[in-house]
Amino acid sequence: MFDIERWQEIFETLSKNKLRTFLTGLSVASGIFILVILLGFSSGIQNGVTSQFEKDATNSISVWTGVTTKEYKGLNPGRRIQLKNQDFNDIVTKYDDNLEYKSAFYTIWGGLVNYKNESGNYRIQGVMPDNQFIENADIHQGRFINHSDVVGNKKVAVIGNKLSVDLFKGDNPIGKDISLYGINFKVVGVFFDPGGERDESKVMMPITTAQKAFNGGNDIRSMMYTVKMSDNFDEAVKLSEQVSLGIENDIKTTHIIAPDDISAIRVNNTLEEARKIYSLVDTIKAVFWFVGIGTIIAGVVGVGNIMLIIVKERTKEIGIRKALGAEPMSIVGMILQESVFVTMFSGLFGLVAGLALLEFVGPLIESDFIKYPQVDFNTALSTVFVLVFAGAIAGFIPAYRAARIKPIDALRDE
Amino acid sequence: MIQIKDLHKSYHMGNNSLHVLKGINFDVKEGELVSIMGSSGSGKSTLLNILGMLDEADEGSYTLDTVPIKNLNEKIAANYRNKFLGFIFQSFNLINYKSALDNVALPLYYQGVARKERVERAMHYLDKVGLAPWSHHLPSELSGGQKQRVAIARALASDPKVLLADEPTGALDTKTSYEVMDLIQGINDEGKTILVVTHEHDIAQMTKRIVNLKDGVIIDDSFVEQVRASQYV
Ligand SMILES: Nc1ncnc2c1ncn2[C@@H]1O[C@H](COP(=O)(O)OP(=O)(O)OP(=O)(O)O)[C@@H](O)[C@H]1O
Ligand SMILES: [Mg+2]
């Protein structure tokens, strides 16, 4: 294998048969190229989907209400269902074993927020301390709303980074007062949210404060819970489904809603959603691998085929070489080494071309569902080695054929 | 140099078998220039292939330069061919993508000679056949006579004990044939043992001994007065 004279002889043969070498290499290079692109995009899709879910906890159950559409127990349709503190507390008590974080919300969709001369419209949300984890809010400065804020309905606020940038223009917002409809709130924290700007342009305050300040009484707009995760994903999905269903039924009972009324109350279970999307991603990945491996097999068969044709075409040459003293093993080595060299070289070429394309085109892709398409270099490299190995196997049958060529048969004049 | 005794060879095709060589006995001494003649199908090429270890006899013994040639496997046969024999074919059998020089150097590659020495020795033999200026040309850029001279240089390159030529002038016109025979005579003059299969009487007359084959047996084996090819060129 490492005989330098042998390599010289092979380079000479390859370089003097450029078209043939090029065609053999092309099938391998394009095979690897396609595989790299496919793997890149499958990881891109995975990254995209994962980052979509990073916005919020993936195991959350959210509950909000609307208007009834069905008559039930003498009550007319068109009735607005209003959740109360009691609903939230009942659910917490009943499902305590299965719930990890819980928060009720009192939301004002567009509220005017002032700081000195700056002002803007932002979402204002009364929340509970657990919401920090439900929304994956990342405290950048200060702290989040805590239990004593809620109990004492303190006039404190945690603002998103967008507000900090818009209103404070680089000043440190902590300890400063912002005013909402003429009421002052002291900023105690600034947060980042993986959900991006939209989730960072809001003000959060204790729910009790929000209810008092904006005449909410005992009303709550929505509630969110996260389900305790078990190690088994399927079990977690099942549990979270059961809890969602239980919550839905409980609220339907207390608020006298027809069991089949789907617009009066909505319970959304992200884990179930996540499961569907992840299984879709898995399917996409499997399909890409399938196509990729198919491409490689096609490439290998292609190389084997081309090598067979080459051997056939070179029958006379091989006969001459044998007549001049080439041993069968040296012929086998020659064909195998050629096949391995060509697959390796063009495989690496396809790999580099594919990686380069991902590198340059990847960042240009503007889709929420494809992010950073890339291939882990080790995966790619091991693919090339698998290919080289396969190339050797592909070269083996032709090499064996070549070794069996009898010089008198090869040299007999037609 | 060559001793063969009672050599038999049959070809089998399905149920038919064709007895081609029916007991050949003959000796060739070092430095002889022998032509083998006979009508088409008389077994000339078959005999030459056995002498060239490209094929094996069914029966009989063959000794080349005191080495008994028997129980050959492919590897041993390849080594013997490389060390002992040089081939010249009717259709030249040059490798078409290699230059004249590389073609001549090929047997040396299989002898394990280093590249630099290969090139030097190949160049020497190309010069000997008068083709030094053509060393970097491909076979397709050479005339028939030139191709056969490259093939002769290649056969000589490994300095074999015996040259075997199967109708070396079969694809050439008369004038070119004589040029090639002149070259072969020159090589023989330097002491090389050469066997030439031919159809043509004038070519046979340029050797020193004519062996006549018919239906697989030697019917005549006689020394002749050698006609020098140089007088025609
Ligand atoms: N591989 C083979 N299989 C079967 N028969 C063969 C084979 N090689 C040669 N023969 C037959 O053996 C006989 C002798 O063939 P050979 O080639 O030795 O003749 P030749 O004297 O060289 O003839 P020519 O002058 O036409 O070259 C022929 O009848 C030929 O058909
Ligand atoms: Mg013949």
Image (cartoon, coloured by chain):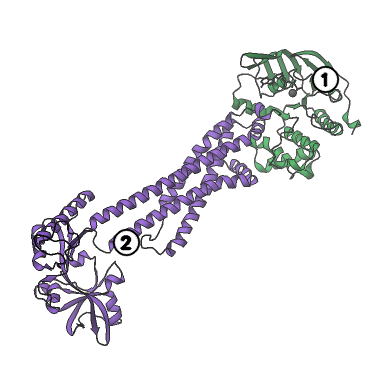
Instruction: Tell me the quarter of the image containing the N terminus of chain A.
Output: top right
Percent of width and height locating residue A390: 47, 40
Question: Is A128 or A251 nearer to us in this picture?
Answer: A251
Percent of width and height locating residue A391: 50, 41
Instruction: Tell me the quarter of the image containing the C terminus of chain A.
Output: top right
The residue where tag 2 is placed is: A51
Mark nearest the camera among 2 and 1 is 2
Kindly identify the residue that appears in the image at 24 percent across and 84 percent down.
Answer: A115
Q: Amino acid at mark 2?
A: Ser
In the rendered structure, the colour chosen for chain A is purple
Q: Quadrant of residue A155?
A: bottom left
Question: Is A389 or A34 nearer to us in this picture?
Answer: A34
| Vertical arrangement, residue A166 with respect to residue B205, above or below | below
Q: Residues within 10 Å of mark 1 (few under 14, many from 20)?
A: many
Where disc 1 sits, the SS reads: strand
The chain carrying label 1 is: B
The chain carrying label 2 is: A
Q: Residues within 10 Å of mark 2 (few under 14, many from 20)?
A: some
Percent of width and height locating residue A129: 16, 68
Horizontal side of residue A218 vs B66, given as left or right: left
The residue where tag 1 is placed is: B209
Gap between marks 2 and 1 measured at Cα: 92 Å
Q: Mark 1: is the Cβ under 8 angstroms from ligand 1?
A: no
Horizontal side of residue A6 vs A392, given as left or right: right
Kindly identify the residue that appears in the image at 78 percent across and 29 percent down.
Answer: B168
In the rendered structure, the colour chosen for chain B is green
